[in-house]
Image: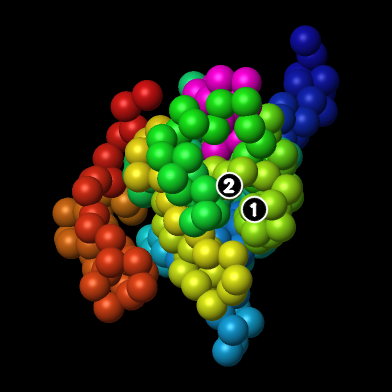
Amino acid sequence: MKLNAILTFLPVMLACANVAQANALDDIKTRGTLVCGTLGTSEPFSFQDPKTRQVVGYEVDLCKEIADNLGVKLDVKMISVAARIPELVAGRVDVVAANLGWSADRAKQIDYSYADYVSPQKILIRQADADKLTKTGDLSGKRVSAVSGSSSEAGAKRLIPDVTTVTFKDPPTAFVALQQKKVDGFVGSELMLLKFQQGAEKTPVKLTMINEPLFTEPWGLGIKKGEKALLDKVNETMAGLESSGKAQTIFDKWFGPQTQFHTERVFKMEEIKG
C-alpha cells in the first residue's frame, strides 16, 4: 500500500482500535457517574424514604461504595424485576443491584459480582390456612403469587408439583392477591415476606410464613457479560468492605438488632459458588 493511502487510513484504524478497547469502566469514568439499576420497592434492599422520597437501602449503599471507589457520582435508576437483565444487556444501567438471585441460566446471560446477600425463599400464607399448609409441598396443585421474571417464580414452578404461578409486576400487587384470596400463597425472599406479614397485623387478614424454605439462593450484583474491568472493580470494592468490617456495618444498618428485621449475617462477600 502506498504511503499516502496508509496515511489516509491511519486515523480510521486508530479510531477503530479505540472503540475496540473501550469498555464499561472507561465509559463510567468518562461520564462521571455509575448508573445503578435497583427496584425501589423492596425494603430494606431498596425503597423510597417516605420523608425524602429518595431511593435508599442496603443495595443502594453498596452501589454508593462502588461509585466512591471509582471516583464518580451515583445515579440510581428504578427498574422492574423483569427489566433487570434487559436493562443491563442494553447498556442502560452499568450495574444491577436488585434482589438478583444467582441461577445457572442467568449466569449465562450476565456476570455476577461476589455475593452481597443470601436469601431463604419462603411462602407467605393466610394464618387461617396454617393448619393445612405446614410445608411447601402442601401447595401442590394450588395457586401461588410471585413477581414476574423472579427466581421465586422459577423456584415455585420447579419445586412445587403442579403449582399454578400467578405473576405480578411488583411485590405489593402479589401480596394483595394473597390477601384477597386469589392465591393460596405468595413466594418471595424471607425478609420481604416478613415486611408484608408485619404490615398485615392490623388488617382482618392475618398472615404467617411456612417455616420450611422453598430454596435458598445467593444474591449478587449483575454486570454485563464480558465487562471484566468493571467486574473486577466491583469485586475489589466488595472485598475491601469485607476485610475492613464495613460490610458488616452496612448490613447492621439495614438488618441489625435496631431494625425490625433482626437478621444475623451468615455470609461473606466472596465469589458465588454456582
Residue depicted at x 49% and y 63%: 197
Secondary element at tag 1: helix
Going by the numbered disc 2, the residue's amino acid type is Phe
Task: Check the image and report above or below for 84 versus 165.
Answer: below
Going by the numbered disc 1, the residue's amino acid type is Leu
Question: 81 and 26: which one is in front?
Answer: 81
Q: Which residues are magenta?
A: 152-163
- Residue on which the image places disc 2: 186
The reply to whether callout 1 and callout 2 are in contact (CB within 8 Å) is: yes
Question: 234 and 189: which one is in front?
Answer: 189
Residue depicted at x 49% and y 31%: 138
Q: Which mark is residue 178?
A: 1
* Quarter of the rendering occupied by the C terminus: top left
Crowding at mark 1 (Cα within 10 Å: few <14, some 14-19, many 20+) = many
Q: Position of residue 165 (x, y in %)?
A: 67, 34
Q: Position of residue 133 (x, y in %)?
A: 47, 40
Task: Check the image and report above or below for 32 versus 231.
Answer: below
- The quarter of the picture where residue 256 lies is bottom left
Q: Position of residue 176 (x, y in %)?
A: 68, 59
Q: Is residue 181 left or right of residue 69?
A: right
Secondary element at tag 2: strand
Crowding at mark 2 (Cα within 10 Å: few <14, some 14-19, many 20+) = many
Task: Check the image and report above or below for 137 versus 211.
Answer: above
Q: Is residue 241 visible?
A: yes
Q: How is the image coloured?
A: rainbow
Q: Main secondary structure of the magenta part?
A: helix
Marks 1/2: CA distance?
A: 6 Å
